[in-house]
Amino acid sequence: MEPLPIQVTVNGRTYSAEVEPRLLLVHFLREVLNLTGTHIGCDTTSCGACTVLWNGRPVKSCTVLAVQVDGGEILTVEGLEGEGQLHPVQEGFWEEHGLQCGFCTPGMMMTAVALLNENPDPTEEEIRKAISGNLCRCTGYVNIVKAIQYAARKMREGMSVHAGGV
Amino acid sequence: MIPGPVRYRRVRSVDEAVVLLSQLGTDAKVLSGGQSLIPMMKFRLAEPSYLIDINAIPGLDFIEERGGVLCLGALVRESTLERSMLVRQRYPILHDTAEVIADPLVRNLATVGGNLAHGDPANDHPATMLALRAQVVARGPNGERSIPIDDFFVDTFVTALQPDELLTEIRIPVPPPRSGGAYVKFERKVGDYAIAAAGVFLVLDEAGRITQAGIGLTNLSYKPLRAVDAERALLGQYASDELLRYAAELAAQATDPVSDLRGPADYKRAVARTMTLRALRRALERAQANA
Ligand SMILES: Cc1cc2nc3c(=O)[nH]c(=O)nc-3n(C[C@H](O)[C@H](O)[C@H](O)COP(=O)(O)OP(=O)(O)OC[C@H]3O[C@@H](n4cnc5c(N)ncnc54)[C@H](O)[C@@H]3O)c2cc1C
Ligand code: FES
Ligand code: FES
């Protein structure tokens, strides 16, 4: 099928591309833009590993076509860090050991970012409900919840975040 | 998994969608939330040659009461329904339903219109709409028509919508005093379709007798089911727990589930009885509180 022109802002940068209408957003991100932080876990809309924010809302990028997001804004895990500073959610996952293999982590963090943007002081139950579309096979979720609580505290306090890494 | 080759057009109005649908016929599919259609295209269970994306049509996402009717635009997202204060306060059965559909990520895109138009007996809104006696509004080349929900679901994945018709709106009668509804679902895990689920809407008179009863059942037959005998058994009666148990039993008898990974048919029928009973009790409580 003939490709269609699209223009998408990903992590603040605007890209123009010609894509086949059947191209999935997750493949556009990973294979066209080389942003491989967004993972494909199940490919059947079940796991949430592919979660990105589309105009601020978390969606499963394996179940959206790239042509659908034409004119829109996408935020992926690569867009969380700014000027060498981890996003509070990233910092929370680091500090609270919110991951083991890390496969679910990008999607989990994107869902957490969207939650905290909407609800800066979620209860544990609200956190668990918000991440109920993101599956983790390793952690048992306890530390993921702690990581999000850490980020919520940090964001509320508006404290400057320290740079991650060594 | 990659969908088959397809063409794509984003339309900006209902008229534009209808014109395209009538030109393209059965080759085209409406793309709404895409949360059923895109998975089916990836499995190649659906191979439309054209997608008509209706998401950019302005003003199709209303939730408002107009002249005794709650009007839901086809593009209302499940997540919007879930967060609506009007829905929470006046239509708890709709809130119950939205909250248990798929998972929060899917709900950010999935639409109420798509949930009905898909004609999937496993979807949750059909049972609720059957209980509420909704009307589905469709627009085609010859104008608009209103389809009673009882006539809407024809077969598995088949509805009364014609290939050149767009579902534009769902209309639900505003609940009278002393009415209450509830939706109760049993699922294996978040994001799964129901093993069994029931939507119930009841209206009481001043003496507490049931004057109207709607019961819809999810994933218990080849299409969304209305438990007509159970409804009839409730009419004109005072709502004792014994009566509710009897109605739940009649509802279970009306089901025709298949044995699959979600369990054998007998088990599903038993779960259907329990879900109906719970939904009846909750709907009754709400009706009594709504006096
Ligand atoms: C992992 C997962 C779990 C799910 N679990 C549940 C669940 O528990 N309960 C539940 O109810 N649903 C569930 N769903 C389905 C989900 O709610 C779908 O979104 C819904 O069935 C279809 O809505 P949609 O807006 O995504 O429609 P689409 O996928 O865009 O369309 C579905 C069908 O309806 C047609 N259509 C859509 N809108 C219109 C319109 N306005 N006029 C005419 N035709 C139209 C399309 O052409 C297509 O054939 C689940 C989906 C996933 C991926
Ligand atoms: S890869 Fe998209 S939901 Fe699993
Ligand atoms: S850390 Fe391994 S899947 Fe979540």
Image: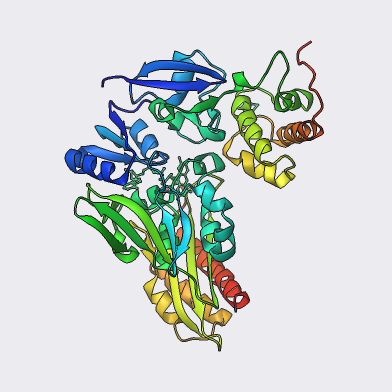
State whether residue B202 appears in this view: yes
B183 sits left or right of A3 in the view: right
Q: Position of residue A77 (x, y in %)?
A: 60, 22
Position in image of residue A154 (x %, y %): 79, 31
Looking at the image, how many numbered discs can be counted on the residues?
A: 0
B228, above or below A106, in the image:
below
Residue at 36% across / 31% down in the picture? B42
- The quarter of the picture where the N terminus of chain A appears is top left
Front residue (pair B34, A83) = A83
Which corner quadrant of the image does residue B125 belong to? bottom left
Q: Residue at x 48, y 56 (%)?
A: B63
Rendering colour mode? rainbow
The quarter of the rendered structure image containing the C terminus of chain A is top right
Name the residue at 65% across, 40% down: A118
The quarter holding residue B8 reads top left
Q: Residue furthest top?
A: A166
In depth, the one of B3 and B194 nearer the eye is B3
Up the image or down, B67 lies above or below B88; here it is below
Residue B98 vs residue B217, the one in the foreground: B98
Instruction: Choose top left, top right, bottom left or bottom right for residue A107.
Output: top right
Q: Would residue A117 appear left or right of A21 to someone viewing this image?
A: right
Residue B100 appears in view: no
Please state the horizontal and vertical placement of residue B167, each as a whole percent of the image.
32, 51
Q: Is residue B185 left or right of residue B225?
A: right
Name, please, the residue furthest toward the bottom. B207
Q: Within the displayed image, which quadrant is ligand 3 positioned in?
A: top right
Query: Residue B3: horizontal and vertical position, in percent?
Result: 34, 28
